[in-house]
């Protein structure tokens, strides 16, 4: 008689969910130190690394809804970290860009955040992290394909 788990995917889901929750808690705590939510930090981070972007492109990069990106950029504008810029080729579209204050904030906090993530993920060495990323990418594509 074998003691095989008839539903290994269920165990994977639980382990993946718990790992994500533990990492997410650390990320939330880290960005909260700077008065930001993870979504706000995500928008700032993509603008910091990619430069000004159409709101739709930011939405796709950080995986928020159409209404969510508008609200998110509104909040970041109110904090003085992001500004909207008109799209010269389409009056209906607008760009989001970091303000000087937003740029200075990200120059200061992004290296700290990246270091924190390095520590959080240090349970796997670099080779294991690369393998895990490849496997999770494959898993995500399979799930998306339905």
Image: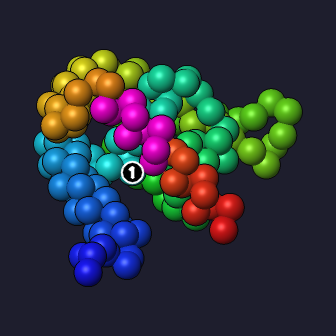
Above or below for 77 versus 109: below
Looking at the image, which is closer to me, 7 or 131? Answer: 7
Residue with the most extreme right position: 89
Task: Please tell me which residue is depicted at 60% across the width and 57% down the height of the picture.
Answer: 142
Instruction: Tell me the element at label 1.
Output: helix
Is residue 69 rendered to the left or right of residue 128? Answer: right
Residue with the most extreme front position: 1
Q: Position of residue 47 (x, y in %)?
A: 50, 30
Is the residue marked by circle 1 packed among few (<14), some (14-19), or many (20+) residues within 10 Å? some
Which residue is the site of mark 1?
A: 39
- Colour option used: rainbow
Above or below for 95 versus 146: above
Task: Please tell me which residue is depicted at 55% across the width and 23% down the height of the picture.
Answer: 51
Q: Is there any visible trace of residue 27 in the rendered image?
A: yes
Q: Position of residue 106 (x, y in %)?
A: 32, 25
Above or below for 67 versus 24: below
Looking at the image, which is closer to me, 72 or 16? Answer: 16
Task: Please tell me which residue is depicted at 25% across the width and 21% down the height of the picture.
Answer: 111
Highlighted range, magenta: 128-136
Is residue 89 rendered to the left or right of residue 7? Answer: right
Is residue 43 rendered to the left or right of residue 91? Answer: left
Q: Is there any visible trace of residue 34 in the rendered image?
A: no
Quarter of the figure with the N terminus: bottom left
Looking at the image, which is closer to me, 47 or 81? Answer: 47
Q: Quadrant location of residue 54?
A: top right
Is residue 120 a member of the stretch shown in magenta? no
Q: Position of residue 18 (x, y in %)?
A: 23, 62
Quarter of the figure with the C terminus: bottom right
Look at the magenta stretch and give its main secondary structure. Answer: helix
Q: Position of residue 121 (x, y in %)?
A: 21, 36
Task: Please tell me which residue is depicted at 48% across the width and 38% down the height of the picture.
Answer: 134
């Amino acid at each position: 008689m074998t003691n095989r788990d008839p539903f290994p995917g269920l165990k994977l889901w639980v382990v993946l969910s718990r790992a994500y929750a533990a990492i997410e808690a650390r990320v939330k705590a880290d960005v909260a130190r700077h008065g930001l939510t993870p979504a706000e930090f995500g928008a700032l981070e993509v603008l910091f690394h990619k430069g000004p972007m159409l709101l739709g492109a930011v939405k796709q990069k950080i995986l928020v809804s159409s209404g969510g990106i508008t609200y998110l950029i509104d909040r970041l504008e109110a904090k003085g970290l992001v500004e909207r810029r008109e799209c010269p080729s389409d009056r209906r579209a607008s760009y989001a860009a970091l303000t000087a204050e937003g740029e200075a904030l990200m120059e200061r906090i992004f290296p700290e955040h990246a270091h924190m993530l390095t520590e959080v993920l240090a349970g796997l060495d670099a080779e294991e992290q690369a393998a895990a990323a490849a496997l999770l990418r494959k898993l995500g594509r399979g799930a998306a394909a339905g």
